[in-house]
Image: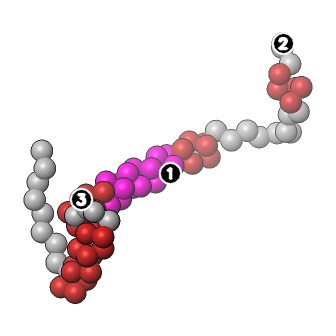
Amino acid sequence: MARNITFSADEALIEAAREAARSENTTLNEQFRLWLESYARKRQADKAMETIQRIRSQYQMTGPKLTRDEMNERR
């Protein structure tokens, strides 16, 4: 369900943005929705990367680096 929200910006900036959207055959509203979705996804991706880094730091291998043959060796 879509909800309406209100933002404040300089009138000249809004008009310039509307004109830019018109030149791209879209609306300022549609461009804002696309930006909002992108912004939210970036935040989610940043949080996921932080989690991955935290897990990696907890499980880092210590000791000598194994060669490819050593890693593939069957025991």
Check disc 3 and give the amino acid type: Glu
Q: Look at the image and say whether residue 69 sits in the magenta stretch.
A: no
Residue 10 visible in rendering: no
Residue on which the image places disc 3: 30
Q: Residue at 88% of width from left, 33% of height from top?
A: 67
Side of 48 relative to 33 (left or right): right
Badge 2 local density, few (<14 within 10 Å), some, or many (20+)?
few
Query: Which image quarter: residue 60?
Result: top right
The secondary structure that most of the magenta stretch takes on is helix
Residue on which the image places disc 1: 50
Range shown magenta: 35-51
* Sequence order check, earlier mark of 3 and 2: 3
Q: Residue at 26% of width from left, 81% of height from top?
A: 16
Side of 5 relative to 40 (left or right): left
Badge 3 element: helix
Check disc 1 and give the amino acid type: Glu
The x and y percentages for residue 58 are 60, 42
